[in-house]
Structure formats: structure tokens, C-alpha cells
Image (cartoon, grey):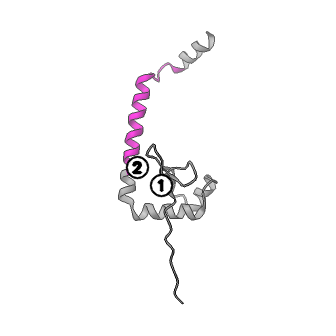
Amino acid sequence: MTILFPAEPVPLEVHPDGVVRMVGTRVTLDTIVAAFNQGATAEEIVFQYPSLQLADVYATICFFLRHRPYVELYLQERQQEATEIRKLNEAKSEPQGVRDRLLARQTQ
């Protein structure tokens, strides 16, 4: 008897905004990798994010481990984008005095 090994696609999809998410969820690859790197097991990740399937989390961790340099490059790029966006937002609205400005608007 010959056993056939069906090809299993990685349960990740790239959204139009360039963010990689678990298929059918809003959970990002960033989230899964960060939890795994902090010592969480696949079971713990599924417990934290009930929209995930255990097999999909294992497949994603496997993908990360097999393609670590590429995933880490993607995560670095995401971190750089987040830093740039944070700087733009801070330039638009100085964080100092936000509470005072909000309270002033409320009294108007």
C-alpha cells in the first residue's frame, strides 16, 4: 500500500495592505510569531485567539521555522512601517497636552 501525502497550503494570506494574516481571521503573522518567540505553545496561542485552528497555528509555526530569514525580514519591515506611521501621527498631533485639548473640546 502506498501512502499519498497531499500538499497542505500554508494557512496565511497577504491582504491588500501588505499584512500577512491567518486565513479567515484578523490574526497577523506578527502576532503568531511574537507569541511563539515569547514561549507560547500552539495550544496557548489558540486559547488566546479562539478564531484560530490548532493545525493552522502549527503549520504557521512550521512555516516560520523553515523560512525564518524571510519572515524576520518581513517583521523588520513591518516594524519600520509602524515606526514611520507613529512618527507621522505624533507630528500631526503632539502627544503632550492631549488630555488638556480633549477636556477643552468637551467644555465647548
Q: Residues within 10 Å of mark 1 (few under 14, many from 20)?
A: many
Mark nearer the N terminus (2 vs 1): 1
Q: Residues within 10 Å of mark 2 (few under 14, many from 20)?
A: some
Image quadrant in which you'd find residue 57: bottom right
Residue 36 % position (x, y): 50, 57
Describe the element under mark 1 as helix, strand or loop: helix
Residue 81 covered by magenta stretch:
yes
- Tell me how far mark 2 sits from mark 1, CA to CA: 9 Å
Main SS of residues in magenta: helix
Horizontal side of 69 relative to 99 (left or right) equals: left
Residue 10 % position (x, y): 49, 62
Residue 5 covered by magenta stretch:
no
Q: At 57% from the left edge and 18% from the top edge, which residue is drawn?
A: 102
Circle 1 residue: 33
* Front residue of 37 and 54: 54
Q: At 50% from the left edge and 18% from the top edge, which residue is drawn?
A: 97
Above or below, 32 against 107 in this view is below
Q: At 53% from the left edge and 16% from the top edge, which residue is drawn?
A: 101
Residue 5 % position (x, y): 50, 77
Residue type highlighted by circle 1: Val
Horizontal side of 54 relative to 83 (left or right) equals: right
Circle 2 residue: 75
Residue type highlighted by circle 2: Leu
Above or below, 20 against 100 in this view is below
User: The magenta stretch spans which residues?
Assistant: 74-98
Dots 2, 1 in contact, CB < 8 A: yes
Residue 69 % position (x, y): 35, 58
